[in-house]
Structure formats: C-alpha cells, structure tokens
Amino acid sequence: MLAGREIRRAKVRFGLLAGAVGLLVFLIMFQQALLGSLLKSFTGAIENQSAQVLVYSAEARKNVAGSVIPPPTQDAVEAVDGVGSSAPLGEATLTVAAGGEQVDASVFGFELGGPGEPTRLTDGRLPTGPTEVVASGEDADDGFALGDEVTSVSGDVVLTVVGLTEESRFSVAPTLWVTFDGYEALRRAANPDAQGVLPSLVALIPADGVSPSELAGRINAQVPDVEALTRAEAVSEAPGVSAVNTSFQLILGLAFVVVALVIGFFFLILTVQKLDSLTLLRAVGAPTGYLVRALLTQIAFVVGGGLVVGVALTVLAVRGASAGLPISLDPVTLGLLAVGVLVLAALGSVVTLVRVARIDPAGVVSRQNLGGLS
C-alpha cells in the first residue's frame, strides 16, 4: 500500500523514470538485434552450410575471398585419415544483373550432394544443374525471388532462381548458391581470359568417430600451407567479425551499467529525501521488511514499465528498419536481455535497500530533540 500510494502521488516522477529506463532498454535490445542480424549477414553463408570443416589456404588468413586451393593441395587434404566426404567450395563477389539493375553478389559454387550445400532452404529447392540458383531470401524483393532470372553482366550466363534461403548471406550482400559448373561459368563470364577456376575452400565432413576439431587438427599437422577450421571457428574468426562483436558488446555493456546507475541513484535520492518519514514509520512499528518490500515494488514498477516501453519501441523500430539489412528479433535473446536488466536494476538498488534496512527507529527521537534545540 505504501509503494502504490507514493507512485500515485508522484505519477510524473515515476513515469519519467520508467520512460528513461524504457529508452535505455530499447537501446540495448535494438543494438543486440542489429548485432545479430549484422553478424548473420557477414557470415551466415558459412554458418548455414553442410560442411563441418573448411580448409583455407594459409596465406588467406581465414578470409574466404582470399583463399585459393590448387588441385594438389585438395588431393593432400582428402588423403588425410578421418575425412569422410569432401567437395570443392568456391566463393567470389561478382556483378550480376537482377531486377533490372546491376548488383554485387556473393556467389558460392558447391557440388550437389557434397559438403558445402546451403542448409537453410525456406522455399523452393536446390539447383539441379548449372542454370539454376538458390538466392538469399532477404533479397527476394530486389530481383532474387523464385522464378526470377539472374544474368552475368555479359549476358552469357542466365540463371533461374529455384530456391530461397534464410540467414545465409555473406559479406552483407545478396548471396547466390550454384552448382560448381554454374560457378565456373559465372567466373569465366566475368573473366574470359581466366586459365582455370579453382575452389576457394575444401569442404569436409569427418568420418564416423572423428570430431570436426580432431579432423581440423590432423589436416593442420599433415598438410602444409593450409589452415583447417571447424565451422564454428570459421564463423567466429572471420576477418572483421571479432572487431564488430567487441565494439557492440562494449556499447551494450555501457548501456547496462547506465541502467543500473540511473535506477540506483534515483531511488537513493528518493530515499534520502523521505528519510524522516521512513524513520517515523519504523518508530510506529512498521517492520523493516515492509519498507524493503515497498521499495522493491517501486523498483519492479519502474523496471517493468521500462521493459514494456523498450520492447514496444524495439518492435516498432525493427518493423521500420531499412530493408538493406533485414533485422529480426530473437525472443530468447530479448528474454535474456530483460532478465539482465532486472538483475542490474536490483544490483543498482542494493545501496538504497541497505540504507532502508538500517533505519533506526530511535532516530526519530534524536531528530525531534535536535529540532527542539534549534
């Protein structure tokens, strides 16, 4: 009752604080959604393909675009004990015509039925020949929908979109998956003088009883001038991913700290302002637990209101976000963030809770005596 009456008497004060917390929650949740979508657009194609181990050339330094695997190297990799199945995997950024415009797209060439196939197919089917292609579903409105035609700039290669993927973009660009024959045709159309088209990576699936990390270790130990990575390592150690992730995590960490400080200082100031009233309540018999519960109720009201405002703003912002980088909300992640905000709000209020718990009922007598002397 004490908490509710105080909130009703100071609606504006508590409302403004809940709004401020809501804006901070919105900042945290929207940036987390943006980070997740950005990382998926960077490396989704690597994460959502069937190979469990990817072999790069050593000089590429884990950069798919800079890796080239010559045939002798591929043969040496396939000869390592523990390789279950193997296939070449090509990647190139090429200019194609789609939707009446020329755009740069990341093109992956894979072998049908082999490691390296896209795994997040949401509509249609995989290509069955060199004139068919699977495209990233996020770019369907830009000329990559089912049935659309994608052509090389020269016009020599015409591909029909027969399938769509989700969360399988690469380098924040429209991403296409073609058979390796179709990939070679696109590369030759872009560079007719090319002597040959080599794969960028060797895609592997370990044999039964061999873990991906174990196979990668064997390849690194036995085959010179290559670097084998598990799929998870290829995603997390891709150039630029670590820097982007660290930058966003720093911003998110600071936002969490601000939430704790704002709530902590607000309630500490509020408690100091009404310390005489709280001391009087203790003197007339109000238990310490009652005052602490009242404070916790107010904190829950502020944080709960802030979460409602923050989630609502995040949903609206995601719906209105630019189509250039599709942003999606993960309910599990939002739930974890909400729990994090609640925990930090409680931690930020520890000083205030301790201050309330230590109120001495005898202090009301001291204050009255001091008032009489004055």
Image (spheres, rainbow, N blue to C red):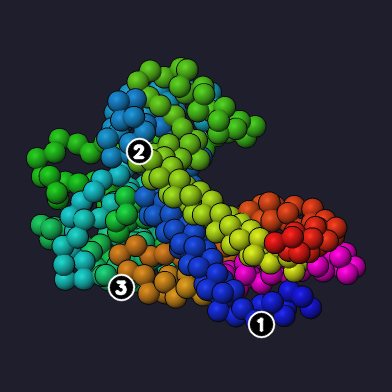
Tell me which secondary structure the magenta stretch mostly adopts.
Answer: helix
Up the image or down, 297 lies above or below 188; here it is: below
Q: Give the number of the mark in front: 1 or 3.
A: 1
Marks 1 and 3 close (CB-CB < 8 Å): no
Q: Is residue 156 left or right of residue 84?
A: left
Q: Badge 1 local density, few (<14 within 10 Å), some, or many (20+)?
A: few
Q: Crowding near pointer 3: few (<14 within 10 Å), some, many (20+)? A: few
Of labels 1 and 2, the one closer to you? 1
**Amino acid of disc 2:** Pro
Q: Which residue is mark 2?
A: 239
Q: Residue at x 30, y 65 (%)?
A: 324
Q: Is residue 369 left or right of residue 171?
A: right
Q: Can you identify the residue that label 1 sits on?
A: 8
Q: Residue at x 14, y 49 (%)?
A: 190
Query: What's the distance in space between the residues labelled 1 and 3, CA to CA?
Result: 50 Å
Residue 316 x %, y %: 44, 75
At a point 66% along the width and 77% down the height, the residue shown is 7
Task: Find residue 157 and report its image quarter.
Answer: bottom left
Residue found at x 50% / y 40%: 232
